[in-house]
Image: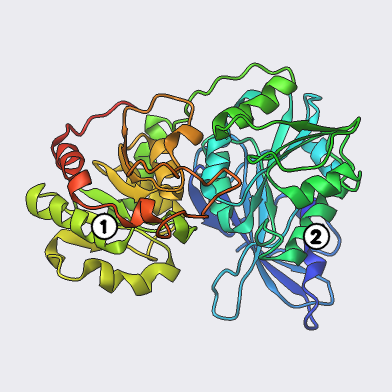
Amino acid sequence: MSPLIRKRAPVAKAARGPMAFTIAIKHRGRITAGCGSWQPRCLADKRKNASSTGELAFGLDALAKLEVVYCPGGAIDGHTPEGPMDGGCVILSPIDADGRVKPVHLLMKNRRQIESIRTDGRPLLVFVTFNALGDLLMALPLLTALRSRFHVLPVIQSGLADLGRLLVQYGLLESCLIAEGSLSVRRNALAHVKTCLALSRLRPDILVIYGKLNIAYSARLGLLGAGRVLFCHPRGLGRRPTRTFEVLPPTGNLTRDYLRFAEQLGVPATPTRTLLTDRAKGQLEQAARPLLDLASYAVVAPWTSDPRKDAPLQFFRECIRVIVEQGRLPVAITGLPQQRSAVPDLLRGLPAQWIRDLVGATTLTQTLGTVAGARFLLTNDGGTLHLARLVGTPAIVAFGPSTPEILFDDSSEDLVVLRLGLSCSPCAKTPLRYQCPGAYLQCLRELDVASAKDALLAACQAPVDRAR
């Protein structure tokens, strides 16, 4: 752990004086602020000066406050670990003057640091895919299968750092790499370059890339230092293969595309759906309980990170009316802070006593716990759908430019699909994506509550117990 903190600390170059750190140990879902009298090995440094509250002062020409969150892989008991803190992921987050944690900054481990936590000699495999939450969760069957032969490190954008920590905590990932900002070169070109530089220092044995063209181009030129590169793009884009750069053709299904990487590496894999354990689910429900004083409820998530996949708010408003007035079931609304401005329009005319507005008011862990405790979820094809699949909550989903057939490769009895079935749909993974022959996004905008009413009422009356 020592080289990680020393490596990250010099980033803050603003002012004079010592650099102060606040230590937080995240251990089986709990975060312990401060270390008490316990001192990690990173303090065995002549520059350190530790107090009993866990505040560290380093003699550096900078002044900043950072939160250090360490997620030990597989350690679960809510107490500060006594032995060496091996595995997991370490995140450094600046804290501003008001005490609010700023976005997570890049912390990549170099080859020597990775070797220090690998004791079984497995080759190092780094996995890079698209930015979205669903892309990562759908890769879990692949990442689980690869762990039998490789030390697997998925690269996760900083916006999903909490998800990465949670997956490490519950053993679905053994560790992860948090990239600064978005992995999209269009949104954050500088962060994209930093990620490529960090990967070049890491020098993985195998680099698996799905869909990220710019990272693939860098890898093909040998700039990322990988011994072997496997690349696949859902629309078949990409350069010609070379001796160390292998290109896999897409199958038309995202899950099968992922599993083909395992086949190419000689690792048996099946499209088994990844589910959290009942114990983990119970812990998540407990974390969300202070937000909802309801014994039974439905969750409605009307927004995704891609507005082109969102059904109209009027559709969701009328569906909520059916749930609360005919199904007699309260509804919790979830969403991100940037979606708060749309809430008044969504809830216009609905009975307030039946609605719990949680938009922008929950952490990812609380959102997952809220979905885990719900009778069912109504949403679009977005991240909340994949959270529901992770915890086994039935979902009623509006599909337009995409369909479950191009995403999943398992039979999902707890997934009800709402779609018009136009001849131009699905188009999201084709060269003609979003080039609508008629009205733009007609496949979503013409959805009406009549097509969903039977499914909604059936879900309101379904037994609470469900297969997980």
Q: Is residue 320 above or below residue 279?
A: below
Q: Is residue 62 above or below residue 28?
A: below
Query: What crowding class fits label 2: few (fewer than 14 Cα within 10 Å), some (14-19), or many (20 or more)?
Result: some
Query: What crowding class fits label 1: few (fewer than 14 Cα within 10 Å), some (14-19), or many (20 or more)?
Result: many
Residue identified by numbered label 2: 193
Residue at x-position 57% and y-position 32%: 252
Residue identified by numbered label 1: 316
From the viewer's side, name the closer residue of 252 and 24. 252
From the viewer's side, name the closer residue of 455 and 363. 455
From the viewer's side, name the closer residue of 143 and 106. 143
Residue at x-position 15% and y-position 50%: 323
Rendered location of residue 319, percent (x, y): 20, 53
Observer able to see residue 214: yes
From the viewer's side, name the closer residue of 35 and 303. 303
Residue at x-position 70% and y-position 65%: 188
Q: Earlier in the sequence, mark 1 or mark 2?
A: 2
Q: Describe the element under mark 1 as helix, strand or loop.
A: helix
Left or right, 260 with respect to 347, comes to: right
Q: Is residue 54 above or below residue 18?
A: above
Residue type at numbered disc 1: Phe
Q: How is the image coloured?
A: rainbow
Left or right, 237 with respect to 139, comes to: right
Rendered location of residue 397, percent (x, y): 34, 44
Rendered location of residue 360, percent (x, y): 39, 66
Q: Describe the element under mark 2 as helix, strand or loop.
A: helix
In the picture, which quadrant includes the C terminus? top left
Residue farthest to the bottom, as pictured: 15
Residue at x-position 53% and y-position 48%: 133
In three-dimensional space, the C-alpha distance between marks 1 and 2, rounded to whole angstroms, equals 40 Å
Mark 1, mark 2: which one is toward the viewer? 1
Residue type at numbered disc 2: Val
